Image (cartoon, rainbow, N blue to C red):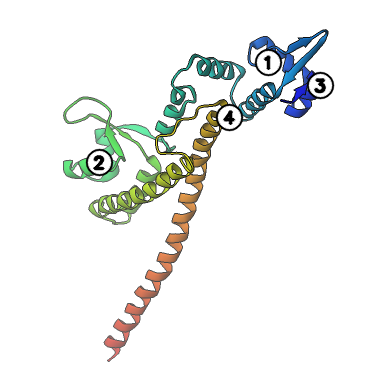
Amino acid sequence: MTEYRIDDLAAAAGTTTRNVRGYQDRGLIARPVRRGRIAIYTDEHLRRLRIINDLLTRGFTMTHIADFFDRLERGDDLAEVLGLREIMSARWSRTPSRTVTAAELHEILGTADTELLAKLEEAGLIEPADDAEPPQEYLITDTESMDAYQRLLGIGAPLEYLVSMQQELDADMDRAAHTLISAGRRAITEGRFDGWIPESDDESVWATQFVGELRRTGRVAAHNSLYRALDRELARQLDDYLSIARERKHRNAD
């Protein structure tokens, strides 16, 4: 086991001797072994310092880090300690929302048809904001999509068509989400086993970081993949559409 004096330990961990002493005072790292007037640190101190540095760079406060180590040492559920349950259950969607009256929603949609409203609710675009029957207020959960649909409605697109498109799109996105999350699940258990839970500080930090990066990467990859697919499909269908138009023109000319 490597032994360090405080200056050497701080340099190896990429921090300062002042921080090392501060972490000791907070109980985040163990006190060193004393050999006369010399304080001796070990690889365990270095490992703990690197974990602290990593957590700090990812936005954790000293209070959060202290709680993290305390709960690990108590043997608490690691999924809870890491905040994995909160991370995994947090909504990926960050779309703005707003509450409107039923009358305002009917005006936006140009209809009060209960079947269409039910389909929009099923698609997750709206939800009742009160317990009245019928609801007197609704939460529009995705104002960006609803505003886009309202513009299409304004130029004559039928609401039934938009609802049908949303349902088909949701089904396609469900398949894409399954692909992404399943790939992440396989990656986190690679060389381990399904249902694996971290058993050390290093594994805990890695698992938390992995889940966070999966969410960030998933957003970027999903959006960009969709845009590329839209470009390909638009080009394909445009060629098909113009080909049909040319055939019709030739037939009419004959």
Closer to viewer: mark 2 or mark 1: 1
Under tag 1, what secondary structure?
helix
Q: Determine the image quadrant of residue 27.
A: top right
The kind of residue on which mark 3 rests is Asp
Q: Earlier in the sequence, mark 3 or mark 1?
A: 3
| Disc 2 packing (10 Å; few <14; some 14–19; many ≥20) | few
Q: Are marks 3 and 1 in contact (CB under 8 Å)?
A: no
Between the C-alphas of marks 2 and 4, the distance is 42 Å
Q: Which residue is mark 3?
A: 7
Q: Which residue is mark 4?
A: 202
The kind of residue on which mark 1 rests is Tyr
Under tag 4, what secondary structure?
helix
Q: Earlier in the sequence, mark 2 or mark 4?
A: 2
The kind of residue on which mark 4 rests is Asp
Q: Are marks 3 and 2 in contact (CB under 8 Å)?
A: no
Closer to viewer: mark 3 or mark 1: 3
Question: Hey, which residue is sitting farthest right in the picture?
Answer: 37
58 shown above or below 156: above
Of 245 and 7, which appears nearest the observer?
7
* Picture residue at 52% right of the left edge, 32% below the top: 208
Between the C-alphas of marks 3 and 4, the distance is 23 Å
The kind of residue on which mark 2 rests is Glu
Under tag 3, what secondary structure?
helix
Between the C-alphas of marks 3 and 1, the distance is 14 Å
Q: Is residue 142 visible?
A: yes
Of 47 and 148, which appears nearest the observer?
47
Q: Earlier in the sequence, mark 3 or mark 4?
A: 3
Under tag 2, what secondary structure?
helix
Q: Which residue is mark 2?
A: 122
